[in-house]
Image (cartoon, grey):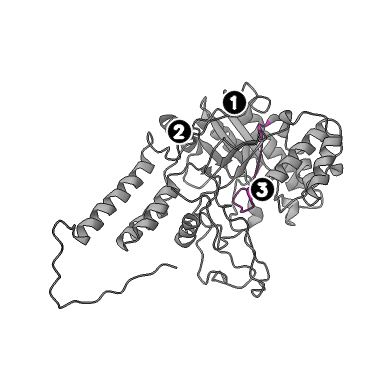
Amino acid sequence: MRRTRGRTTATTTEPTRPTGAIPRRRRLRALTALVAAGTALVLAAGTAGAAGPHHGPGKDSGPNPGKGKGPSVTRFHVPPPNPGALTQIKELVRAGQLRDADLIRRMISTPQAVWLTGQEGHDVRADARRTVIGAKWQRAMPVLSLYNVPGRDCAQYSAGGASDTAEYVEWIDEVAKGIGPHPAIVILEPDSLALMPNDCGQDDEEGTLTAARFEEVRYAVGVLAAKPKVNVYLDAGHSDWHRVDSIVSRLLEADIASARGYYLNPSNYQTDESLARYGNLISGCLAYAAEGGDPADCPNQWWEPQEALDWLAANVTTDRAEWTPYVTDTSRNGRGPWSAPEDAAYPDPQTWCNPPDRGLGQRPTTATGDPLIDAHLWIKIPGESDGECLRGTDGPEDPERGTVAPRAGQWFPQQALELARLAQPALR
């Protein structure tokens, strides 16, 4: 909760300041200028890599990034921040909350993805080109999160997307033209495989829309992964969602073999430990399937850990160094997932939707300590709302927060400050 100080009218004579003391108003102006200067750095394309260098695993991948090494990364790109973040910084400074203002500044000066969403009035080719050129000026690797597949988010808070497959194909072609010869990491369509039309009752008996979804993802993989300097990662949900065999079957049908790998935890809050275990099982199961095995035989994330490892050791002959790699979204998982209070009894807790008291996670890096994990990334923009979050009630307020949450993608100052204050590791 943010405190505001009351203001009283003083009639007494102002006390004498010690010799050499700086007046409070002048000191506040000076600190304000420092915060503003730091914020301006975020917008400067050539100097915004505030998170410092991140050493990558090797050289740029070959003609097919899915078959070669991971992306060559010395630092990740810092995009211009959500305007709501700059407004929040100004308001915090005016309130004298300079420490909090600096926390938000540090948060938005951390590398994170640029979302291309097919928003009306946007030229996606120009937006993609602007991003990769901006990253070039920063001598950094851009991360593009493409989010325009037809029927995205099962018509929930982030509903939208292209109207049909033909429109989506045209959009992907424009994205590819915008990227051009430049390097990029592409996070292809969050929830596209973990939240299919048939998962939410929006498909017909023939599975027409689900079949189209696979066609759309395969097309995007084919176009983007063909670029020598582009590394494409496919959606694999997170460790508290689909069983390993379920998500592996979807990755196979979506042509994971032509992509660099997959990604975990987009816009979610699962711990690094649970994601690493889940990723190890997914990659092991993909290797097992490539050897001719049935994914249905694979251990899942709810097996006893050692039993699952023993199964992989006994049944997968491919060297672990050759297993499919992945990246994780650590933007908001510093304190792990949220559970609704037992006395709340929400009809639908929506634990993924603007949960309270969460914190930023690991900063983006390729120094993950695990050969299977290409990078930890900030895919979700921390501080942007997940949606109105009614938790199964009639609303309009989020009953957990006692306020009407902003629409998905809009800046949420209350949550932004929580994430920054409770970051693990702490913002420095």
Q: Which residue is mark 2?
A: 135
Q: Which residue is mark 3?
A: 273
Q: Residue at x 64, y 74 (%)?
A: 344
- In this view, 405 is above or below 116: below
- Disc nearest the viewer among 1 and 2: 2
The N terminus lies in quadrant: bottom left
> Looking at the image, do the residues carrying marks 3 and 1 touch, with CB atoms under 8 Å apart?
no
Q: Which residues are magenta?
A: 259-274
- Disc nearest the viewer among 2 and 3: 3
C-alpha separation, residue under disc 3 versus residue under disc 1 = 33 Å
Q: Looking at the picture, which amino acid does disc 2 mark?
A: Ala
Q: Looking at the picture, which amino acid does disc 1 mark?
A: Lys
Residue 374 at what x, y percent from top left?
Answer: 62, 35
- In this view, 315 is above or below 91: above
Q: Which residue is mark 1?
A: 227
Q: Is residue 384 left or right of residue 306?
A: left
Using a 10 Å C-alpha cutoff, classify the residue at mark 2 as few (fewer than 14 neighbours), some (14 to 19) or many (20 or more): many
Looking at this view, is 56 or 175 the one in front? 56
Residue 52 at what x, y percent from top left?
Answer: 45, 36
